[in-house]
Image (cartoon, coloured by chain):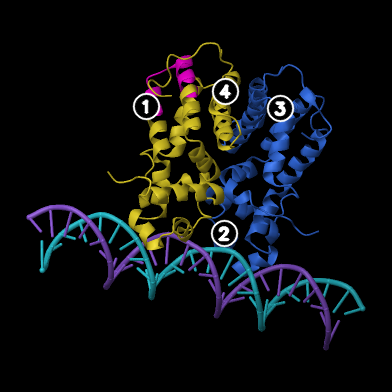
Chain colours: A blue, B yellow, C purple, D cyan
Amino acid sequence: MARTSSGLHERLLASALRLFVSRGFRGTSLADIAADVGCSKASLLYHFSNKEAILTELLMPVGNEVFALDERLSELDGEEAALTAVHSFVGITLRFRREIKLLFDNLADVSCLPDLGVETMDGIRDRLVDAVAGRSAAPRDRVAALMALGGIFATGAADLPYDDLTLREALLTGALRTLNLDPGRTVRDAEPGKN
Amino acid sequence: MARTSSGLHERLLASALRLFVSRGFRGTSLADIAADVGCSKASLLYHFSNKEAILTELLMPVGNEVFALDERLSELDGEEAALTAVHSFVGITLRFRREIKLLFDNLADVSCLPDLGVETMDGIRDRLVDAVAGRSAAPRDRVAALMALGGIFATGAADLPYDDLTLREALLTGALRTLNLDPGRTVRDAEPGKN
DNA sequence: ACGGTAACTGTCCGAACGGTCAGGTCTGAC
DNA sequence: GTCAGACCTGACCGTTCGGACAGTTACCGT
């Protein structure tokens, strides 16, 4: 019912995302955001209990997807886990380019958000690495896994002037090469439904 | 002549690095650093003209090496440029693990430091990517190059419990695989002298 | 008409923080 | 002895910013 296009809440989120991405989280004050949408700072704090809450709400969608991926991966093993993880992670990265950049550029601030998931970011990262490494404990495999994930992450954060299809293709082949995996076969629908 | 082990300047730098890495640049106040070494904040500001200057001085060594690498690369082309860039970048990353983590976690703050190089960070990054891509303009090559560099960067920032030799080997093979380059041959002394 | 509630705002406040300044102490040179 | 300069400090200041609060307006059900 409510026209989402003029809902102040959504407009505040949009402005906050834009400003956070361009000036950083700490570099953006509540007054900046309020001024950007043309409302009062008090009004902003009516919609969000505090500054962190804005960041949390912005990052929640990505957090949820990564969390869901993490759960899905817990049941997989070996090459299947690796392929699923890579495909899905690429998908998430592409679907949330701006948020990924926000994350990438503000790791220090984001990493101590209390309510993003139940889990700490490091925990999620470690389990992702574990999956991408195909559950191998060998240093080479762990490093390769971290490199693949880091590469996707960093590349997603740098806003390259390529369309999603090109980028997806390049990211996938790059990551699979890093992991020394056969890029020929597609994983059995890494993200069922939408991806 | 001056005992470097008790020079206040050096001790301040050491404390600042430790605190910046663990709590972030913005998350560390001048008072924190001063308290950590047990001197007054005023004394801290006697040694460094302002807070940024501390960060700049901490990052200067890395900046210089990257800058030197950048210059060396400008004369190389194709596969030679790529191999040199990768080898040297891995070397730098390993030699400055803590600083790389500082950089990685505080990109938003670091990216607007005025006096690090003459150049903006984006400029250096772009030219590094250009070299690693072997001067190719094809999207695939650019993405692969960015992934390789990002992977090395991210992996260097995550302080893995591996020794330098293991890490170096793993980083190199990972990056070269990402770039689809033959890992067999070592580049003709990528960093002459020490590396 | 009226009470309640959601949306919104002006104003104020306290804390944190970066930075300044006047001055104090020590040492070494002349 | 004294002058200069490096080193260090307590006290202070201005600003910025996140957040609290007491309202006010507008809408809606009854």
Quickly name the residue at label 3.
A137
Residue for point 58% across, 28% down:
B147
Could you give the CA–CA distance between mark 2 and mark 4, rounded to whole angstroms? 42 Å
Residue labelled with disc 1: B71
Q: Nearer the viewer, mark 2 or mark 4?
A: 4
- Tell us which disc is closer to us: 1 or 4: 4
Neighbours of disc 1 within 10 Å: few (<14), some (14-19), many (20+): few
Q: Quadrant of the N terminus of chain A?
A: bottom right
Nearer to us: label 1 or label 2: 1
Q: Please indicate, yes or no, whether residue A91 appears anywhere in the rendered image.
A: no
Asked if badges 1 and 3 are on one and the same chain, I answer no
Disc 4: which chain?
A: B
Of badges 3 and 2, nearer the viewer stands 3
**Range of the magenta residues?**
B69-86
SS state under label 1: helix
**Is the C terminus of chain A in the top left, top right, bottom left or bottom right quadrant?**
top right
- Asked if both marks, 3 and 4, belong to the same chain, the answer given is no
Q: Is residue B188 visible?
A: yes
Q: Label 4 neighbourhood size at 10 Å, few (<14), some (14-19), many (20+)?
A: many
Give me the residue at 74% from left, 47% from top: A119
Residue B165 shown left or right of residue D4 in the figure: right
Amino acid on which disc 2 is placed:
Asp
Q: What residue is drawn where x is 56% and y is 15%?
A: B181
Residue B195 falls inside the magenta stretch:
no
On the same chain: label 1 and label 4?
yes
The residue identified by callout 2 is A36
At label 3, which amino acid type do we have? Ala
Q: Nearer the viewer, mark 3 or mark 4?
A: 3
Q: Earlier in the sequence, mark 1 or mark 4?
A: 1
User: Which of the two residues, A105 or A136, is positioned nearer the viewer here?
Assistant: A136
